[in-house]
Amino acid sequence: MKYQYKTQGTCSRLIDIEVENGVVTDIIFTGGCHGNLQGISCLAKGMRIEDVVSRIEGIRCGNKPTSCPDQLAQALKAIANAE
């Protein structure tokens, strides 16, 4: 299934996510630090939702209470709750 998540408090604006049977198959960030977010996307592909969330939830960007990885974790949690 394809999902789109509107981020809050980060440079990236949107995250497009594809998930099949609880496994992340694709992630595309719109906005943000392209190289870093492309790396995060590649690392998360093929992983189970709960494994990605456990590794990146709570990461902060500077003084911000969130980050692009944390927003990805929030998106994946919302997807897991919807499935």
Image (cartoon, helix red, strand yellow):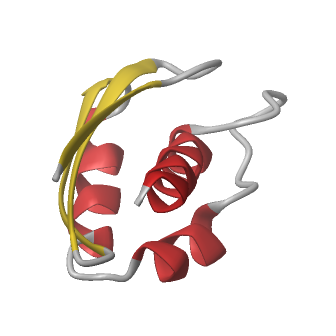
Quadrant for residue 67, please give it.
top right
Report the side of 42 relative to 40 (left or right): left
Question: Count the marks: how many?
Answer: 0
Closest to the observer: 48 or 61?
48
Whole-percent x and y of residue 43? 29, 73
Q: Quadrant of the C terminus?
A: bottom left
Residue under the point 48% across and 19% down: 11
Quadrant for residue 73, please give it.
bottom right
Residue under the point 32% across and 70% down: 44
In the displayed orientation, state which residue is furthest to the front.
Answer: 83
Whole-percent x and y of residue 47? 32, 82
Relative to 24, residue 79 above or below: above
Closest to the observer: 50 or 57?
50
Report the side of 27 relative to 67 (left or right): left
Closest to the observer: 77 or 66?
77
Residue under the point 35% across and 59% down: 40
Quadrant for residue 45, please give it.
bottom left
Relative to 31, residue 49 above or below: below
Whole-percent x and y of residue 37? 32, 46
Report the side of 81 relative to 30 (left or right): right
Residue under the point 38% across and 82% down: 48
Whole-percent x and y of residue 64? 78, 27
